[in-house]
Structures are given as C-alpha cells and as structure tokens.
Image (tube, helix red, strand yellow):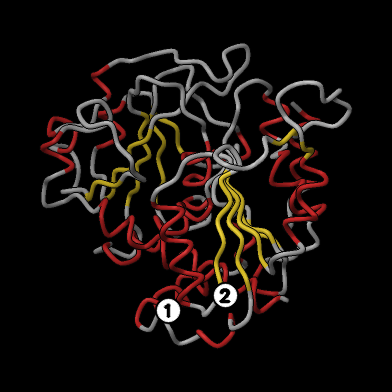
Amino acid sequence: MKNIEENKLNNTNFNSPLGVGGKSFTNVKDLGNLQEAIKEALEIKKNRFAYKHIGENKTLLMVFFNSSLRTRLSTQKAGMNLGMNTMVLDVNAGAWKLETERGVIMDGDKPEHILEAIPVMASYCDIIGVRAFAQFESKEFDYQETIINQFIKYSGKPVFSMEGATSHPLQAFADLITIEEFKDKPRPKVVLTWAPHPRALPQAVPNSFADFMNEADVDFVITHPEGYELAPEFVRGARVEYDQMKAFEGADFVYAKNWAAYQDPNYGKILSKDMNWTVSSRQMAVTNDARFMHCLPVRRNMIVTDEVIEGPRSIVIPEAANREISAQVVIKRLLESI
C-alpha cells in the first residue's frame, strides 16, 4: 500500500496547479485556489463563449476506454464553447484494441501498444482528455492511474481526466459548483452516502467527491456499511459514520453513490446489497430539507427511490448541466498553459 501511495504522489502534479501553469488535471490540487476556480466557473456560466478565441485552431482529443453520456457531451460542448475542434476516439469500438502493460508478449487480441498509440494520438491534437475506469484486476494498477499517467508521461500534451480508475475530478468540480449555487448557508452539511447496486462499481466518483469536499468550506460526512471504507488519502479528515440515519441528521446536501470495496482482500467486490441504504423519504425526513445529488446514471429504487429523485429537492439535472462548466474551466486553463 505504501508503494501505491508513493507512486500516486510521484505521478500527481501537486506543485503545478492549472491556475499557475500546470499541464494536467487529475485532482482538486490541480485547480489551485478552489474559491478562484469556483468564481471563474460562475463567470463562465454567465457567458460561455467569452473565451472562444483562445481555442481557435486548436484541437481537443477525447479518448474513451469506457462508455459515456454526460462526460462525452459536456466535454465536447465545453471545447466547442472555447472555439476548439473536437475529436472522439472510442478505443474499444472501432479502434485497435490497445495493450496497456509493458513486458507483455503481444500474441493475443490487442495488436497495438498504448506506448506507440499515445504519441501518435498526440500528434493530431493540442489537448487530450482520457476516460479509463478501474479494471478491478489489480489494485496497484488501478491506484497508480496507470493509463492516464501514461498519457501524461508520453503524449507531451496537456492531459485531463474524464474519469480515471480512482478519480472523477470533472464530476466533483461540477458537484462543488452546484453546491455553491444551491447552498443557503455559508457552511452547509454535506453527506456522501453509499447505496446498493447490482454491479461492482469503481471508487472514482466517491473518491473525487471526498477529495473536493475536504478542501471546500463544508461540514463533510461519509456514511457507508462497514467494509466499504474508502482510501485514506481521499477520506482524510472527513467524519465517517456507519449509522446512515445519524449521518443524515441536519444534512443540507445528500450525495448518493455506490462503490465496491476498497480494502484488501475484498478489493472490487460487492459486500452488501442492503436495500435499507437506498435513499428514500425515510432518510430525507431527518435532514435539513436536504438537496439530493447523484452523478448519474442512477439505478432507480436501488440507489434512490422515484419519490426522492423526482422530488422538488432533487438537483441531479442542474448538477449534470454543470459538467459543461467544470470541463470548460479546466480546458480553458489548459489552453492558457500551452
């Protein structure tokens, strides 16, 4: 575990946030001053085409190793708002399958190695966005963010995460923008709750949500069944509460998300499908009339009931709409760093 965390630190651009000339975006530190980033996002939202000139004759390449709806559309729209040409590559649909590990004898179904593919892709663009989920085959491979960090290392171009194996910073930034817009007190209570799901899902969204909330001016609580503890580098100083009802008391925002187990020997496994954790009016009744949030897509009546997600306190649609804004801030700053 120590080696994994050391490698993550070595591969993270902590000392060069985008606000002061960094060339990658994979976590909250890469934004620099968070309040300044939020201010910039709200200004861009008022006039999305104010910086169209800075992307003129520049090309954004979005590389997808996994499926997408909001990320694809919002990021492409953000690039277009900035005047960029945009290209999309679906690695597993119409492109050569890519080998991602070194030292492998390539006698299988992957005819091209990512170490050749990356510089080729980079020759056609100015900025690269990468989406590559956790594979749950090796915690070390996943938590080193092997694929995204290969793009950062070998492309020679600014690179940003459109969701990696361990983080989804564009989503978390959009979540923070949404909380800023909807909060009715200076320091709201924000609760991240685990909820059941039929499939084992990566920890990327809850990791990044925790990463951002720990740097924001909020009272942050994480609640989940025992065995679903997130990586300590993301939890940091957040309060962890195993009693969901207790965690929900007085909450101003409730963020529901499923994730598979992180701790060994259960990494990537489903340990519970307890429907008592499904967010319903029962839990929401003890909150401070909380707003409900989710990154989408959502499994209705597993993660959250119809009543809650369709209710007047649900803000999942404006939350999703802010994905365009979070992406535009990041891409704008990357363009300015070129």
Mark 1 or mark 2: name the one nearer the start of the chain.
1
Question: Which residue position is annotated with label 2?
Answer: 332
**Identity, as a three-letter code, of the amino acid under mark 1:** Ile
Left or right of 186? Residue 50 is right
Task: Kindly state the secondary structure of the residue where label 2 is placed.
Answer: helix
Left or right of 54? Residue 185 is left
| Visible residue check, residue 164 | no
- If the image is split into quadrants, where does the C terminus sit? bottom right
* Above-or-below relation of 147 to 156: above
Task: Kindly state the secondary structure of the residue where label 1 is placed.
Answer: helix
Left or right of 209? Residue 296 is left
- If the image is split into quadrants, where does the N terminus sit? top right
Question: Which residue position is annotated with label 1?
Answer: 44
Q: State the residue in front, 60 or 211.
A: 60
Tag 1 and tag 2, C-beta contact below 8 Å: yes
Q: CA distance from mark 1 to mark 2?
A: 10 Å
Q: Residue furthest front?
A: 94
* Category of crowding for the residue at label 1, using alpha-carbon neighbours closer than 10 angstroms: few (below 14), some (14–19), many (at least 20): some
* Category of crowding for the residue at label 2, using alpha-carbon neighbours closer than 10 angstroms: few (below 14), some (14–19), many (at least 20): some
**Identity, as a three-letter code, of the amino acid under mark 2:** Lys
Disc sitting over residue 199 in the figure:
none
Residue lying at 70% horizontally and 25% vertically, measured from the top left: 109
Residue lying at 78% horizontally and 29% vertically, measured from the top left: 2
Q: Horizontal and vertical percent for residue 266? A: 57, 13
Q: Horizontal and vertical percent for residue 113? A: 79, 38
* Above-or-below relation of 131 to 232: below
Q: Horizontal and vertical percent for residue 262? A: 56, 24
